[in-house]
Image (cartoon, rainbow, N blue to C red):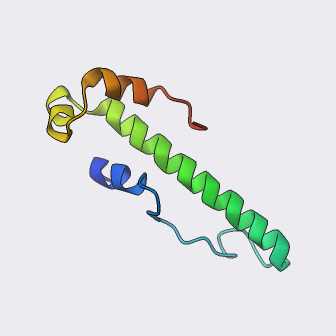
Amino acid sequence: MSTIDTICLSRPGAKSVECSSALLGGDYPEQRESVLKRLWGLYCELAAKRRGRLALGEMSDWQLRDIGVSAKDARQQSIVPFWR
């Protein structure tokens, strides 16, 4: 996955993996499946944000200038915990 793909996936509404009962490990009652889907969706969202932040931390100064982000801001974002 490229840096741009990682950053694009961190946008709200972007999806890289469809949530399905197959991903969740089998057939469950509807209510339990709904909870598992929401938890999986939350995990996917947090993981995408973390990948994007890590990608910012690995970019060179000229790449950061190209996207309009200062090196200081990129470094600060790269150390933000995944739950924020």
Q: Residue at x 30, y 47 (%)?
A: 3
Q: Is residue 3 left or right of residue 37?
A: left
- Which quadrant, please, contains the N terminus? bottom left
Q: Is residue 17 left or right of residue 3?
A: right
Q: Is residue 32 left or right of residue 79?
A: right
Vertical arrangement, residue 26 with respect to residue 7, above or below: below
- Which quadrant, please, contains the C terminus? top right
Tell me residue 75's x, y (percent). Answer: 36, 24
Number of marks: 0
Tell me residue 54's x, y (percent). Answer: 41, 35
Tell me residue 57's x, y (percent). Answer: 35, 30
Q: Is residue 81 left or right of residue 79?
A: right
Give the quadrant of residue 55: top left
Vertical arrangement, residue 56 with respect to residue 27, above or below: above
Vertical arrangement, residue 71 with respect to residue 8, above or below: above
Q: Residue at x 43, y 51 (%)?
A: 10
Tell me residue 50's x, y (percent). Answer: 49, 41
Q: Residue at x 26, y 33 (%)?
A: 59
Give the quadrant of residue 27: bottom right
Give the quadrant of residue 62: top left
Q: Residue at x 31, y 32 (%)?
A: 58
Q: Furthest residue to the top? A: 72
